[in-house]
Image (cartoon, rainbow, N blue to C red):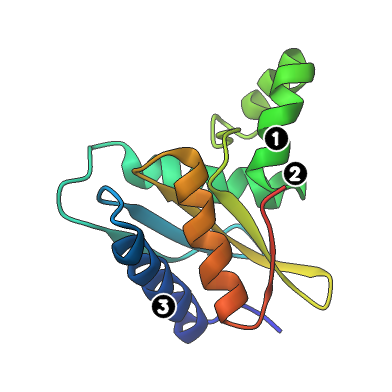
Amino acid sequence: MEIDLNIAQTLAQACLTRAAEMGLKPLTIAVLDAAGQLKVLLRQDGTSLMRPEIAQSKAYGAIAMGLGSRSLYQRAQEQPYFIQAMNALADGKLVPVPGGVLIKHQGSIIGAIGITGDSSDNDEACAIHAIEAAGLEADGG
């Protein structure tokens, strides 16, 4: 299974629906495929300038490292030099805070969602909800 445009759009819209239910601040949502390529980017009105890059980098970092960004955050606390080195190798496209959630199917990584705009915990909760609602496995770390 792979993340096609239809699945990516469904996941992104489910994130927005969940955010509205939770009363969150405006979000930016990026859905990437397993190769780290952008499939969908939604940016709600009122988001700040760098939100698209942050959302994509949360998702990209998760795919690149094979870990949800919550795990990357914990690793950054324990081994900051390692995460700094990985971020340098990734050309700065690794944001080690919650909100980058791996999308898995039968245990294999098929993509990731990156969300930014509210608290990192709320960003992550929206992504997890959307992935699980689609019948896929969410791994935020």
Q: Give residue 17's position: percent from left, percent from top.
A: 34, 71
Secondary structure at numbered mark 1 = helix
Residue 65's tag is 2
Quarter of the image where the N terminus is located: bottom right
Badge 3 or badge 1: first in the primary sequence: 3
Q: Quadrant of residue 3?
A: bottom right
Residue at 57 percent across and 82 percent down: it is 134
Of badges 1 and 2, nearer the viewer stands 1
Between marks 3 and 2, how big is the CA–CA gap? 24 Å
Q: Amino acid at mark 2?
A: Met
Badge 3 or badge 2: first in the primary sequence: 3
Between marks 3 and 1, how big is the CA–CA gap? 26 Å
Q: Amino acid at mark 1?
A: Leu
Badge 1 or badge 2: first in the primary sequence: 2
Residue at 43 percent across and 40 percent down: it is 54
User: Is disc 3 in contact with disc 1, using a CB cutoff of under 8 Å?
Assistant: no
Residue lying farthest front?
22
Q: Give residue 36's position: percent from left, percent from top.
A: 60, 57
User: Is disc 1 in contact with disc 2, using a CB cutoff of under 8 Å?
Assistant: yes
Between marks 1 and 2, how big is the CA–CA gap? 8 Å
Secondary structure at numbered mark 3 = helix
Instruction: Using the image, determine if residue 109 lies above or below residue 2.
Output: above
Residue 72's tag is 1
Q: Give residue 18's position: percent from left, percent from top.
A: 39, 67
Q: Amino acid at mark 3?
A: Gln
Q: Give residue 49's position: percent from left, percent from top.
A: 23, 37
Residue at 57 percent across and 31 percent down: it is 91
Please tell me how crowded label 1 is: few (under 14), some (14-19), or many (20+) other residues with Cα within 10 Å.
many
Q: Which residue is mark 3?
A: 9
Between 78 and 83, the residue placed more toward the observer is 78
Between 92 and 107, the residue placed more toward the observer is 107
